[in-house]
Image (cartoon, coloured by chain):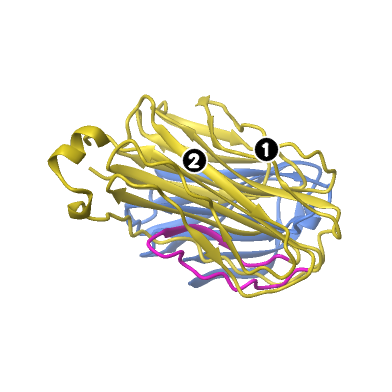
Amino acid sequence: MPSAFVQKVTGNGATVVLNGVGAGNALFLQDSWFRTSTTGVAEATPTDSNGTFHISNANAPIFISSAAVEAGVGIFDQQGAASGTHTVTPQANSGHNTTLCEFSGLVTSSMFDTGTSAKSVVNNHTSQATGTTPTTAQSDELVLICCAIVAHTGSSNVGWTDPVTTFTTRQIVINSATDIATHHSSKNVAAVSTQTATELWIATEGGIGSMACIATFKASGTTASAALSMIFPSSLAGMGGNRFFGDRLSYSVLSHYG
Amino acid sequence: MTVLVNASVNIPSGSHDFGPFATTTKAALIEMDGTVFPAGTTTIALLFSFDGGTTFPNSASGTYIGPTIPKVPTYRLSFELATQPDHVKATTIAPSAFTTQVTLSTL
């Protein structure tokens, strides 16, 4: 049984708050961020007034030497959430774009399955893979991906390929000149497999850095991979997918963030 | 995208509403010029109604700190539900009055 999207909030302030969260549902925080005071340290786990987040994937950031900034991505999860209001505070850093989603239909213990990340500071690159996860533990899983682009000069529209093939966009920010170009997405899968995705964009620049990550989470009411493979060949297991509207954010260049 | 508000707005101290506006979309976005926010914490909220704008049972919000000039100058908040509402409104709760450019849209 695939997971189901319930609600989401996106923002770039100090906190994001979701009200009316259903008991036992799962919360996911996807974050794209940058720091002008570089530390080389991955993003810290966000705090929640009504629960505790777990690191799904948050690795050491990229460093863009020409801009003297570092940037990164992180995915955090909270299984079996308490009902009510969740006030979530991501690490502030110098700026961040945060997506906080609620999904139903996930297991309430050992929900996190796999995750990985990849990054690049190669001049003029226009793609970033997430890396490839180990094989998922079961067939029905929720997959989240998260990408950030930070550039020395930047572009008012990096030209994301949107949506990422087979994914539903949860937040898109197109500006790398006065913001962190951001792409947060999700999808359901229904077959035991490794998972990967590739983010594509158009804008090229010498001083560019990008980082992407991926994490998978177990849906409830599914059969573990070993048992499933005895019943159904993986080629017969169809691909599922949520199809809800994502953000379509666009705004003008105001000034460089440096 | 339908733009519901796009104007320079005098936001008073305390609570201030934008709307409610009729909508058939499940997502809304509010953007404000973050460089002019007052000292302290300003809350921005988006709320959806399913009874013609009488009550707003579903909401999300964010807090935004002033007067430090943010590295990313536009403050944003979006909210999306899986179910279709019939009205949307935005609310600000500010520590003191200020004037800022506001864009409120349904997506």
Identity of the residue drawn at 48% across and 72% down: B1
Label 1: which residue? A43
Tell me the residue at 20%/40% (across/down): A229
Q: Residue furthest left?
A: A231
| In the foreground, B66 or A124 | A124
> What color was chain A assigned in the picture?
yellow
The region drawn magenta spans A154-176
- Is residue A224 shown to the viewer in this render? no
Q: Is residue A244 above or below residue A159?
A: above
Specify whether B93 is left or right of B68. Answer: left
Q: Nearer the viewer, residue A52 or A111?
A: A111
Which chain identifier belongs to the blue chain? B
Q: Quadrant of the N terminus of chain A?
A: top left
Question: Where is residue A29 drawn, in percent x and y?
Answer: 53, 41
Q: Is residue B102 above or below residue B98?
A: below
Q: Are marks 2 and 1 on the same chain?
A: yes
To which residue does mark 2 refer? A115
A155 within the magenta span: yes
